[in-house]
Image (spheres, rainbow, N blue to C red):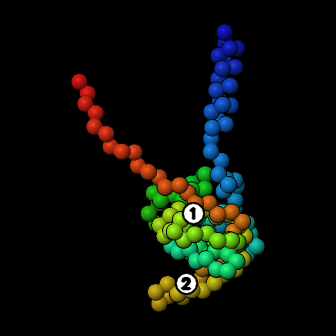
């Protein structure tokens, strides 16, 4: 009987583990933040960065995304519960066309790619050093839709 319970537990774990969603941004990456990469010392390193999209700019051969970086959860999704934005900003470019109507300001994105340098652009009147990322993976997170409030009457 104990063997049957153990076997049932193992089968349940395998089946439920197979239901776990694995995103294309899953995996282990060095803990390098965009803020740390502003010096150019991290060039050539493979990283996983994400955050809130500020702007998507399609060009002839690629689309470049300006992003406000956020810490990432273990699954790679930006963690919006973190109120401090000291991870910095970055620009990620990926080959092809990404429609700005879908990749709209305020959406959550995660990128995997190689740090390629630093580009200085103005934020207001401030010259901001944006680390650049050549993205091999661009992941647009699905919108989290809050559950509707329902009224329940308990007797």
Q: Picture coordinates of residue 23 (x, y %)?
A: 65, 51
Q: Is residue 41 above or below residue 72?
A: below
- Distance, label 2 to label 1, CA atoms, is 21 Å
Q: Picture coordinates of residue 2 (x, y %)?
A: 67, 12
Quarter of the figure that contains the N terminus = top right
Rendered residue at 68%/31% (across/down) = 14
* Mark 1 secondary-structure assignment: strand
Q: Picture coordinates of residue 40 (x, y %)?
A: 69, 79
In the image, farthest residue toward the left: 155
**Structural crowding at the residue carrying mark 2, measured as other residues with C-alpha within 10 Å and reported as few (<14), some (14–19) or many (≥20):** some
Q: Give the number of the mark in front: 2 or 1.
A: 1
Residue underneath mark 1: 109
Residue 135 in view (yes/no): yes
Rendered residue at 68%/25% (across/down) = 11
**Structural crowding at the residue carrying mark 1, measured as other residues with C-alpha within 10 Å and reported as few (<14), some (14–19) or many (≥20):** many
Rendered residue at 53%/62% (across/down) = 108
In the image, farthest residue toward the right: 44
Residue 133 in view (yes/no): no
Badge 2 or badge 1: first in the primary sequence: 1
Q: Is residue 11 above or below residue 100?
A: above
Q: Is residue 27 above or below residue 95?
A: above
Q: Picture coordinates of residue 39 (x, y %)?
A: 65, 80
Q: Which mark is residue 119?
A: none
The answer to which image quadrant residue 116 occupies is: bottom right
The answer to which image quadrant residue 29 occupies is: bottom right
Rendered residue at 55%/57% (across/down) = 141
Q: Which mark is residue 128?
A: 2
Tell me if 132 is positioned left or right of 56 in this view.
right
Tell how many labels: 2
* Nearer-the-camera pick, 103 or 77: 103
């Amino acid at each position: 009987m104990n063997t049957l319970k153990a076997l049932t537990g193992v089968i349940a774990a395998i089946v439920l583990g197979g239901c776990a969603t694995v995103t294309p941004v899953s995996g282990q990456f060095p803990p390098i933040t965009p803020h740390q990469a502003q010096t150019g010392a991290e060039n050539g390193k493979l990283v996983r960065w994400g955050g809130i999209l500020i702007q998507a700019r399609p060009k002839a051969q690629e689309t470049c995304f300006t992003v406000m970086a956020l810490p990432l959860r273990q699954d790679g999704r930006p963690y919006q519960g973190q109120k401090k934005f000291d991870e910095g900003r970055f620009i990620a470019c990926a080959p092809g066309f990404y429609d700005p109507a879908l990749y709209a300001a305020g959406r959550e994105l995660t990128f995997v790619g190689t740090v390629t340098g630093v580009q200085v652009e103005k934020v207001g009147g401030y010259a901001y050093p944006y680390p650049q990322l050549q993205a091999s993976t661009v992941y647009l997170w699905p919108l989290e839709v809050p559950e509707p409030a329902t009224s329940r009457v308990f007797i």
